[in-house]
Structure formats: structure tokens, C-alpha cells
Image (cartoon, rainbow, N blue to C red):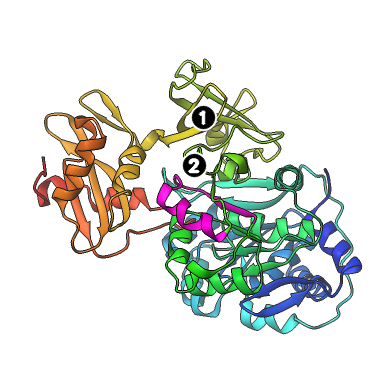
Amino acid sequence: MSGTVIDALTFWARLKPDLVAIDFAGDAVTYAELNAWADGVAHELRSRGVSAGDRVSFLGVNSLEWCAAALGALKLGAIAVGFNQRMLARELIALVEDCEPSVVVCDENLRTRLDEVHQARPEFSIMMFEQDVRPLRGRQPEPIAAPVVDLTDPTAIVFTSGTTGRPKGVIFTHATIAGEMHEWSLMEGVLPNKLRPLLVLPLFTAAGIIWGIARTIIHGGTLFLQPGFDPAAALRVLIDDKANTLTGPPILFEQIAKVPGFDDADLSHLTTAHVGGARVPVDLLKKWLPRGVALRQIYGQTEIGGSATVTPRADAETKPEKCGWGTIFTKVRVVDAEGRDCAPGEPGEILLRGPGKMPGYWRNADATRATLRDGWLHTGDLGSLDDDGYLTFVDRMKDMIISGGLNISPAEIEAVINTIPGVEEVAVISVPDEKFGETPAALVKAAPDVTETDIVTHCNGLLADYKVPRYVVLSADPLPRMASGKIAKRELRDTHANIPDLYTRVR
């Protein structure tokens, strides 16, 4: 498969001009309108000196203006780069130094922060979503001629969430996006104009700009975009607008299942419900099955295009802990420290290759060499393959706790604690221990009647003693999360490094 997202946009604008391309919380824009809007933005960007290969960055919450601005950049062959609007000026300066955008398009309420960035790095110009992009909607500018591009040229940069350090810019090319979407259209049986995804995650992530905007436009579908995650609003879209695709971490599905009316809803039209970032809890699976929805675990990374494997529909109920065995063109290996394939059931590093594999990190040759070796993406994740080739994700290699010489997977402990009634969220981190070097500590958001003793007793019955947390920190507040919806483990490790000094050991 070849071509660009702009090829798809102009095609569907001509063939299906009145089809809704994006519905933003009820404010809909058709393919013809979106194409003309993107042309207008492209003219504005060109007047500011933007040309093919330049970077155009976006700093703002989900909006139609964000989408139109990104597509306008792609109209010129520029590279779209999303910035996390929650970042502080210091963090944004690092991203600007990395990708050197020609223009940054910004929300009005973030202008002061961007001005601080601009003082430190004045090389870019500033556009505003409200003042510069929004007024271009509804106009009929001269169409922008499709740029002549090499399909291996970068078209988007998505910064990693920085779970292991400073964010790195993952390069998406025209070819990797098209190849990834072609593969998943075969996997999920997506028909032209029938894709109707609900997006509640931020547009600056791969879930947003790649799997939200690009995927929908390539298939000529309708994207139901929300300003953020509101469980009640999400359920209304699923019911009333019959969105048929939803992807996110388990907490997204858990919160929707708590909305009044969920237990009576017919959601059988939701044919693609993918859960990423953590295992699918069995009790969560049981909540959605009566609604006609089989939650299926996916595994992947931004560096492989976002998703690399998915549990087959037939195995959703019987193998909820599995991530499938790869996809049509994407292959999976699990290797030991010497690079040899592990035996079935033996944990090792997960390696991936496929059409969505990145060509590298933006201007980071060292990280690229460390991650892409011998044609494979080295994920830094631990997993195992069973006799049938099914992948089980174990944990991030950097998250593994080594206590007294024994490896402990935080994800395994979290899965056990999550089965306790009243537990809403849990994160297990490593903390210092005089005897064992390091030991597990469980940070738990739970109902008031859940005690430390309840958690330890439950773990004692299901885990080897060395895996049972020696510290339990209960909280009524939600655990911090990254933009992807995953719990921010690195932040928790930083803020709770002194747990042994503040809390009493529970065993």
C-alpha cells in the first residue's frame, strides 16, 4: 500500500463530500469542508515560510482546529509534531530544541507558556488556533497541489511519553502509516466509509494523530473526537452515534462501565474494543461481554506504529491475558540476553518487526542504534511465548524489581491486587531495602474499607512470599497518569522514593 493521508483526504472529499469526517462533541465537519479548511491553513503556513520537510508543532487540547492545522501542514509536505499541552515551559523548550519547528500553533490559554518557550528559542513563529485557524473554516481557498513526496519521507513525529527518560521523537513516514493501516484493515475487516472510532485520548499521541486522524481519513470514516475523557459522554457516543471502534487503557473501559445506563446498553456494534497499556482484568471483561463487546488486549509501542498484536476475537474470553501472536505482516520474537530465541514459557525481551516499524528517532542516532538492531525493534519489554506462539506481556524490563537476586514483575503483583473488591487503581514500584537491595511497594487507590492487611493477605494467597509487597500506601486520590492513560510509574518512583522512611513495613 502506498500514498499519503492527504491523498486520502482529497479523494474522499471528491467522492464523499458530504460525509462527516470529524464530529467534535456534536460539531461536525464534512470531508469537503475539512479539505478546504486544511487548504486554507496550508496557505497561511506557506505565507509564514513553511515548506516541505519543515516541522509544524501543535500545542493545545483536542479540537477541530487542531485537526485542520495538522492536515494543513501535511498539505505542504511538512512534518506534523504534537506537543503535550500539560508540559511546562522547561519541558517544551527541550522538545523545540529537538524538532526545531518553523511554526507552533497554540491554544490561547497556553500562549503565556509558549511565549516563555519563544523567549528561549525564538526561531519559530506562533499561530493561534482561535485567531488564525478557526476563521479559515468555511472558506473556499485555492486548492493546494499535492506535494511530491518520497513515501519514506517523515510526515509526523510523535514524542514518547518519557517513561524511561527524556522523550524521544518517533518518526512516522507516509509508508509506515499507510502500511500499518493496511495491515489493520485486513485484521479488523474495515470497509471504506464504515470506520467510526471514538477518540478520547489526546491528539498529540500516536492514538490521536495516527490512529485517530490518519487512520480515519485513510478509510474515509467518521472520527468521533471528544475534548477529553468524560465517561458519560463517551457512553452517549457509543450508544447514539454507534461508534464501532474504541481503544484505550483498562481504566477507560472501567469508567464507562460505571456510567448509569451501561448495564442496559446494546453495544454490539462496537466491534473493535482494544485494551492497551495493561492486562484486561477478567472482571472487566465480564462487564462488557453482556453488552455484546469482547475486550481484546493489544500489545505495541509508538515505535512499531502503536499496535503490533491483538488477541483474536475467538480467544477474547478464554485467553484474556494473551496479546495474540502478531498480525499478518508484523512478527514477534522473545529472546534472551544473548539474542537467542527463548523456549516456550521462558521470559525474555520482546522483539518486533512489521510495516509500522519506525525508521528511527528524530535526530537521535544513538537511541536509534540501540533500539533497531538486525532488522528488529528491541522493545525493552519482557514477555513470553507459549507453545502456540501467543504472547504474554510480563513487564517493562526497566520496571523489574530485583529483590535479593530474584526478579519480581510489578505487573504480576498489580494484576493480583486489582482483583480485590474495592481496589480501583494500583501501581507497584521498587523502593530501597537494606537486606534485599530493593523490594516492592504497592500504591493503591481503593474504597475506605480496604486495608493494608486485606491487600497483604490477598497477595499471600496468590503470590510467592518474596513478591508480596512490604509496603502498602493507600490513597483516596487517583494515581497520576500519562497522556496515553497509563499510570505514570516514573513520576511515582520520583515522588515516593522515600517510602521506607515514611511508612511502616506491612510484613
The C terminus lies in quadrant: top left
**SS of the residue at dot 2?**
loop
In this view, the residue farthest toward the left is: 504
Give the image quarter of residue 469. Answer: top left
Closer to the chain start, of discs 2 and 1, is 2
Q: Which residue is mark 2?
A: 320
Would you place residue 270 above or below residue 350 in this image?
A: below
Q: Position of residue 321 (x, y in %)?
A: 47, 39
User: In screen coordinates, is 456 left or right of 322?
Assistant: left
Label 2 vs label 1: CA separation? 19 Å
Q: Which residue is mark 1?
A: 350
Amino acid of disc 1: Ile
Contact (CB < 8 A) between labels 2 and 1?
Answer: no
Task: Give the magenta range.
Answer: 271-291
Give the image quarter of residue 422. Answer: bottom left
Would you place residue 111 above or below residue 456 in this image?
A: below
Q: Residue at x 67, y 47 (%)?
A: 172
Q: Position of residue 427 (x, y in %)?
A: 31, 49
Q: Residue at x 74, y 69 (%)?
A: 45
**SS of the residue at dot 1?**
strand
Would you place residue 127 above or below residue 286 in this image?
A: below
The N terminus lies in quadrant: top right
Is residue 287 located in the magenta-colored stretch of the structure?
A: yes
Closer to the camera: disc 2 or disc 1? 2
- Note whether residue 468 is visible: no
Q: Position of residue 411 (x, y in %)?
A: 36, 40
Q: Position of residue 158 (x, y in %)?
A: 59, 52
User: In screen coordinates, is 33 left or right of 361?
Assistant: right
Within 10 Å of disc 1 (Cα), the crowding (few <14, some 14-19, many 20+) is many
Give the image quarter of residue 2. Answer: top right
Counting the numbered discs, the total is: 2
Residue 331, numbered label: none
